[in-house]
């Protein structure tokens, strides 16, 4: 039964207080001539009213409460809690069904390898495969795959700063020089150092808590000395329970050169505050140990473009659901376009994320990834409808850009670029 609406008693003034001669009422266009005493009295009254009125903050979201508001309304406004996102809950009886659905959409090793995932620990042969030819610039592992033993290259390289589109040695794109074999440069030290540290997810030690069956993961990264990236924050959430199992900040092992605040949300001040609060660990190895305490090789890891998060912690894990791959392959098997997490949340869940000007919220991104993958496995029909709509949109977008390229090519034919000057003979 609805509660009765409380009555609001308005302030009453006696009729005599409103009595005033008609001649004293101002008309539009009349000029008001106030004396100095009148101006002071008016200013005093205005300051008094301003002091009694409720103040509004810079980000005031609602109307100010007037003096005639009833006490019941005031109590209701004080008890109202701020609106927060409500994430999905998976009831206990559905856990097995959800796990079975997640296992069905895990990616195979070939898909993971094509998307840049490490599918086994790196060997010495693997690391040598990352050596580059000093002439053609190709990596050894790529050349071995293509069985290219001879080296075809240009003696003179392009200068992209001068917007050169043809090689200055021959004026063509096709290689003009060749050697019977490639000449490889040594693999860079930081590559060897990083890749020697990759490890498969270990089995849990006996006596510890049972590992989680499915975990959503996200990391934020900063740039350190040498141009490398290191993890600065890691968040992990149990897919089934929705429980936050890891939420820690990481002190990089090297000096930070770029905090990448618009994307990572990290700053030196924030990291120092977290360090004082005791919410940090030192280095990516400690962060990896904190995650390994909750997972095992059978745990399903879920993330958006998760290969970057695993690389930053030198992890090799094979049970993966990448929402970027999942959405891309649903649109088309040969599709190369990725749908970002923000876009997936808006289109699938009608929810806005990453709205803060201070950068991404690592925990919010982790929960959003969990929500997206649960929506995909819980609503396969809607997921296919989304894929069909995106397929149609992609066809229109591709046709639009194809037309734009044709128009651009026609304009370049009418106004050809200046030919690159040939190198004078010696």
Image (spheres, grey):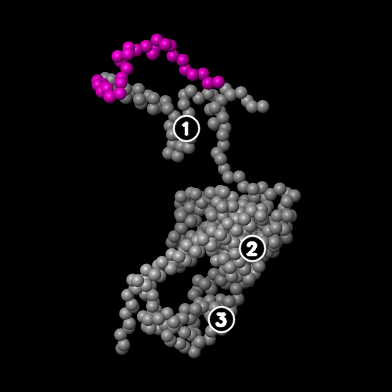
Residue that mark 1 sits on: 63
Horizontal arrangement in the rendering, residue 333 relative to residue 67 (left or right): right
Image-quadrant location for residue 25: top left
**Closer to the camera in the image, 287 or 146:** 146
Magenta span contains residue 30: yes
Residue that mark 2 sits on: 320
Per the image, label 1 sits on a secondary structure element best described as loop
User: For the point 56% across and 52% down, which residue is it?
Assistant: 347
Real-space Cα separation, disc 3 to disc 1, in angstroms: 69 Å
Q: Where residue 14 sits: x, y (%)?
A: 43, 11
Mark 3 vs mark 2, foreground winner is 3
Q: Where residue 419 sits: x, y (%)?
A: 33, 77
Q: Where residue 245 sits: x, y (%)?
A: 63, 53
Per the image, label 3 sits on a secondary structure element best described as helix
User: For the point 59% across and 64% down, which residue is it?
Assistant: 332
Per the image, label 2 sits on a secondary structure element best described as strand
Image-quadrant location for residue 128: bottom right
**Start-end of magenta stretch:** 7-36
Real-space Cα separation, disc 1 to disc 2, in angstroms: 49 Å
Real-space Cα separation, disc 3 to disc 2, in angstroms: 29 Å
Horizontal arrangement in the rendering, residue 395 relative to residue 319 (left or right): left
**Closer to the camera in the image, 323 or 253:** 323
User: For the point 57% across and 80% down, which residue is it?
Assistant: 145
For the C terminus, give its image quadrant: bottom left
Q: Where residue 380 sits: x, y (%)?
A: 66, 55
Q: Report if the CB atoms under discs 3 and 1 are less than 8 Å apart.
A: no
């Amino acid at each position: 039964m609805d509660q009765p609406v409380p009555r609001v008693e308005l302030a009453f003034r006696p009729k005599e207080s409103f009595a005033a001669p008609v001649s004293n009422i101002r008309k539009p266009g009349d000029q008001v001539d106030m004396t100095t005493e009148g101006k002071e009295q008016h200013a005093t009254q205005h300051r008094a009213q301003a002091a009694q009125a409720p103040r509004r903050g810079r980000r005031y979201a609602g109307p100010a409460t007037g003096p005639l508001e009833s006490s019941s309304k005031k109590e209701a406004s004080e008890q109202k809690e701020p609106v927060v996102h409500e994430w999905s809950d998976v009831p206990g009886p559905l856990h097995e069904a959800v796990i079975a659905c997640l296992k069905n959409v895990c990616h195979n090793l070939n898909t993971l390898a094509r998307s840049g995932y490490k599918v086994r620990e790196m060997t010495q042969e693997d690391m040598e495969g990352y050596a580059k030819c000093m002439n053609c610039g190709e990596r050894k592992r790529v050349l071995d795959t293509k069985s290219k033993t001879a080296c075809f290259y240009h003696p003179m390289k392009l200068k992209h700063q001068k917007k050169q589109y043809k090689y200055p040695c021959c004026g063509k794109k096709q290689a003009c020089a060749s050697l019977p074999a490639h000449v490889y440069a040594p693999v860079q030290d930081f590559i060897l150092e990083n890749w020697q540290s990759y490890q498969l997810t270990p089995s849990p030690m006996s006596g510890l808590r049972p590992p989680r069956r499915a975990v959503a993961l996200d990391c934020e990264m900063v740039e350190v000395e040498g141009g490398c990236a290191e993890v600065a924050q890691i968040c992990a959430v149990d897919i089934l329970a929705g429980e936050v199992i890891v939420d820690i900040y990481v002190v990089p092992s090297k000096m930070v050169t770029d905090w990448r605040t618009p994307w990572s949300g990290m700053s030196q001040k924030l990291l120092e505050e977290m360090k004082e609060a005791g919410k940090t660990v030192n280095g990516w190895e400690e962060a990896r140990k904190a995650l390994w305490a909750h997972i095992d090789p059978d745990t399903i890891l879920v993330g958006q473009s998760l290969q970057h998060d695993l690389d930053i912690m030198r992890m090799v894990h094979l049970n993966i659901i990448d929402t970027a791959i999942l959405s891309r392959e649903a649109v088309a098997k040969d599709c190369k376009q990725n749908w970002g997490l923000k876009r997936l949340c808006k289109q699938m869940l009608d929810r806005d994320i990453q709205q803060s000007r201070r950068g991404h919220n690592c925990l919010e991104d982790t929960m959003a990834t969990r929500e997206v993958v649960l929506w995909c496995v819980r609503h396969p029909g809607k997921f296919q409808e989304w894929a069909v709509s995106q397929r149609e949109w992609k066809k229109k977008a591709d046709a639009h850009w194809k037309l734009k390229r044709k128009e651009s090519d026609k304009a370049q034919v009418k106004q050809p670029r200046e030919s690159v000057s040939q190198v004078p003979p010696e």
